[in-house]
Image (cartoon, helix red, strand yellow):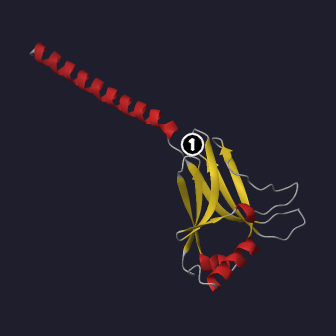
Amino acid sequence: MDWILFWTAFGAIGTTLGSLITAIAVAIAVRQYKQPLVKRLKIEFSSAIPVGLGIDNELFCIGVSNTGVRAINVSNIYLNVGKKNLVLNSAQFFLPGMLEPLSFPVEVLPEQKVQMYLDRTNIAEFFAENIANGHFSKSTPVKVAVTDQTGGWHFHRTGCTVHTLASL
C-alpha cells in the first residue's frame, strides 16, 4: 500500500471539509449581520366586538406587530383603495378612558403590537357613499398600508373589496 497517496488523499479530504465549513460559517455571519437591518411587520385586519363596555358598535381592528429585531417608527396607517390612500386618523373609534386612538408617529418595539379601531358602520357608510358618487369601483380590492419613518411602505391584503365593506 502506498502511504504517501493515502495521507495525501486524507489531507485533501480534510482541507475540503474545512473549506466547506468555513464557507457555511461566513454565509451565516453575513446573514446575521444583515438581520438587524431588515424591518419585519405583520399587519392584521379583523373585526372586533367590544364586550362589557355598554356599546353595540362592531369595529374593525387593524393591528401592526413588529416581528423584527429593531424598533420601527410607524408614521401612519391607511386603507389603500386602488391608487388612493384613505387617512384613518380621524376615523378611529374613541371611547374615553378605554380605547385611546393611536397618535402618529408611534414607535413599535420588537415583539410589540399597536392596534387601531374603526367603527364598522362609519366605514360601510363611507364606502357606500363613494361608490354612489363614482369615486370607487365596487370590485377594487382594499388593502391596509402602513408607512414607516424611513419612507417604507408595507401592505396587507384584507380579502375585501370596496363593495364588501360598503355592504356591511
Name the quarter where the N terminus is drawn: top left
* Residue count near mark 1 (Cα–Cα under 10 Å), binned few <14, some 14–19, many ≥20: some
Q: Residue furthest bottom?
A: 132
Question: At numbered mark 1, what does the secondary structure look like: helix, strand or loop?
Answer: loop
**Closest to the observer: 3 or 18?**
18
| Residue 75 x %, y % | 63, 51
Specify whether 162 is left or right of 58: left
Q: How many marks?
A: 1
**Closest to the observer: 98 or 89?**
89
**Vertical position of residue 36 compared to residue 84: above or below:** above
Residue displayed at 74% across by 71% down = 120
Specify whether 163 is left or right of 2: right
Determine which quarter of the picture holds residue 95: bottom right
Can you see residue 59? yes
Mark 1 residue type: Gly
Say which residue label 1 marks: 68
| Residue 132 x %, y % | 64, 86
Can you see residue 112? no
| Residue 37 x %, y % | 50, 39
Specify whether 101 is left or right of 164: right
Residue displayed at 74% across by 65% down = 91
**Vertical position of residue 48 compared to residue 27: above or below:** below
Residue displayed at 62% across by 62% down = 78
Residue displayed at 72% across by 58% down = 116
Determine which quarter of the picture holds residue 139: bottom right
**Vertical position of residue 149 compared to residue 78: above or below:** above
Determine which quarter of the picture holds residue 12: top left
